[in-house]
Structure formats: structure tokens, C-alpha cells
Image: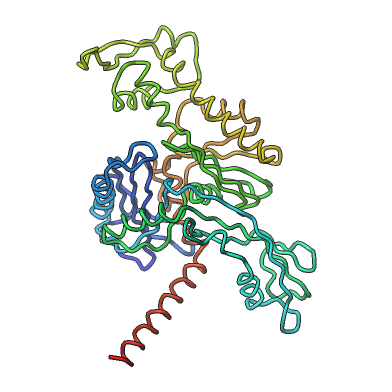
Amino acid sequence: MIYYGKKKNETSSNLISGIEIGTSTISCFVGDFDEEKKTSAILGFGQNKNLGMDRNRITDIKKFKNSIQSAIKKAEDESGTKIEEAFITSSLLKPKTKLVNVLSEITFGKKVSNYDLNHAFRKIDLSSFENDENKILHIIPVEYRLDGNEIKGSPIGLYGSQLQIKYNIVYTNRFALQNINNLIKGCMIDVKAITTSAYSSGLACMESINHSVGNYIVLDIGASNVSIAMFSKDLLLHLVQLPLGSEYITIDIAKVLNTDKKEAERIKNLYGSVEISENDFTNNVNITSLTDTNQKEISTVSKGDICNIIRPRVEEIFNYVRTYLESRHALAPISKILMTGGGANLNGMKDLAEEILGKPVSKIAYNKFSTPIEELSDPMFASLFGLIEYKSIHEYELEKKESLKSKILAKVKKWIDDNF
């Protein structure tokens, strides 16, 4: 058990629970958020292999659900807390984004108010993003202009004639979203909100960026996907997932060294590197390989040979990212790249990323714990603990959602009372 710096049975009104649904692992935490210090004490943590997926495909829904329940139970047991509701992040959602501009005349004495912001919001044509195939995850204002002049921050209280707002609409496949919703609710947990791992990873990294930096990218190297989140001074501009991740490195190792996936993952974690030296070819390690009859046997391989398997795939991943960004003319304006995800932990990743992408790169983990936790201060947990930042940033949006839900329930109750 990890010691988190807080007694197990302490209670708080600021408890937050988060679950990350990944293609290779399921992770869950229970935390206590300090509103004043903007830090969190982690009361419990659980992680389990996702046994219901093979890369990006759900292969066994029962095993998938059991994997979620196992991670939840570990977090509940450590925290002494029953999880009833949770924020969810997942790499199974393949997000799309689109920037939309809205023009709106200012009413009531030409002073911008909440009414004007809501009026502009209602003018967004949502039909392209909310339909039989797609479902909106977030509508994020990224730019305000008043009579053509850009406004930093909220325009409320300023005077003018015309308000222009640029929104970033984040949407995803409706059925993928529904599947995750149903899996979590099947574990008897209410879903507070669902977001994509690309976005929550980006939120986790915000504290690590110098706010004078203009455009920057958060590169989350997961098992089956590489997620790219592009920000401009903490405002999300673009999200995408590319179908190539660190699990492909494991598959390459298994094929070349003729071993099973579990042993290949062990080899990658213990000896994986993209930096090769002459000494690596004389430094041999023992591995478990498979014979022609699928019997296990001990064999040896040099660290240099392992690196020669890994490096070409990592080069492919970074070149894929570069090609995508260049196709959108998005690489040139980028000042910095923040790298997260389990794949970022391979030795030499930072230097190789800088070489191929041509930008400064930093490996980043979530670090706003009230007590430092070495085991959880790892890039692979950035998207999970980014849910803490998500709750804080989207608090107003969540309050509106809860208020609307309460009003609907009140109307339903009144109708039942009046008619039955």
C-alpha cells in the first residue's frame, strides 16, 4: 500500500473520484481537493489490466467490466470510501474538434452581461456535432472580441456594440461514449462528466508551462494511441488521437525475440531505450523465449539488439506526429512540447522527440499533490489526475448541468403529483 499523507478514515466535503479507461489499463483514485491551496491529497488508488480489450477493440465486455470494478475496489479499500460518483477520462473516445465563430449584438445598454454570453452560445449551430453519430463533449470559448478588439479574459462588464466569440467544439462518436457510460453505470457509479484522455492530460500539464509561452502541445503516448492536445496560453485549440502507441513496441519485441506479450512488456519496461551505445551490444540479458512447440526456454539477447527493435517504431511514432502537425500547418507556431503517457518513460524519448519534431520537449507528470507521491508522479498518470483540474476548470459548466437536471426532475415530480 502507498502512504498518501492522509489518514484513511478522514472525511471531506471536497472528495473527488476519477477513473481512467485505457486500452491497456484501468486506473481509479479517490482524492481530497483543497480549494484554498489548489492541491489534492490522494486517499486511495487502484489500477488493473484491461482484460477486455485487444488494442483498440473491445473483445470481452464481461472482462472489461470486471477490470473496472477491480480498480475501483482497490481505490475504495485504500481510502475507506465508497465511490458513488466519478469523473471519467478515456482514450477510447476519439475526439474531433472544430472552431466556430459567433457574432452577437449586445443588449441592455451595451454593457456585456451573462445574458449576452448565453445569447451568443444559443446561436451556435449544433446540428453538425450533436446527431445520430456524434455527441458533444465540450464547448469551450477560446477567444472574445468586442467591436473587433480581442479581449483577454471575460468581457463581462465592458461596453460595446458587437460581441464575437470563438468556440472550440469537442465532440466524439456517440456509441463509444454510450458504451463507456453504460460500463461505469453498470458498476453502480454515477458519471459526473466524461472527457477524453488527450484533454485531461493537457489540463494536468498546465501548471508546468510558463504562461508567457504561446502555443504548445501536450503529447500523450498511450498504449494504442498517441493523443495530441494543442493549447494557446491554456486555451484548448485542437485535439486528435493518432492510432499508434507504445503497445506496438511490445508487439515488435514479441515478434522479433519470439516471446509472448507479457515477457515482451517486461523486456520493454526493464531494458527499453531509444539510445544505443557500443557497450549495449556486449551487455547481454536473459529473456524467456518460445520454442517452435511453444515451450518456454531461457535465451540471451543484447541490450543493443533490444534498442534496435524499439527505436524504429518510436521514430515512426514521432514522424507520424510531425507529418500530422505539418499537414495542418500547426508545427511552426509551436513553442514547446510536453510529453506524457506511459510511453514517455522509455529512456531517450525526450532527445529523440526533439531531434524529429525540432522543438523543445519536456517529460511531464501531474505534480499538484499536497504530499509528494513518487509512485503516482509519473507521466502515465497525467490523464487520470488531470480530472482534478477538469473538475476545477469546468465547475461552472457542471453546476449548470446539475441545475438543469434538478429542474427537470422537479417538473417530472410536479407532473406526477398533479396527475396521480
278 is higher (above) or lower (below) than 359: above
| Residue 305, position as x, y percentages in the image | 42, 13
| Left or right of 306, for residue 292 | left
User: Image quadrant of residue 116?
Assistant: bottom right
Q: Nearer the viewer, residue 93 or 222?
A: 93
Residue 18, position in %: x, y?
37, 55
Q: Please state which of residues 190 and 73 is positioned toward the viewer in this rendering.
A: 190
Residue 40 place in picture, x, y as percent: 42, 56
Residue extending furthest toward the bottom? 418
Quadrant location, the N terminus: top left
Q: Name the colouring of the figure.
A: rainbow
Q: Is residue 133 above or below residue 265?
A: below
In the image, 237 versus 47, the foreground residue is: 237
Residue lying at 42% horizontally and 53% vertically, measured from the top left: 370
Q: For residue 91, which quarter of the picture?
A: top left
- Residue farthest along the front direction in this orientation: 132
Residue furthest toward the top?
282
Q: Quadrant of the C terminus?
A: bottom left
Task: Please indicate whether residue 182 sits to the left or right of residue 143 in the image.
Answer: left
Q: How many marks?
A: 0
The residue lying at 30 percent from left, 14 percent from top is 286
Q: Nearer the viewer, residue 206 or 256?
A: 256
Q: Position of residue 310 (x, y in %)?
A: 45, 21
Residue drawn at the location 55% of the way across and 42% of the way down: 228
Determine the residue positioned at 47% across, 26% down.
Answer: 347
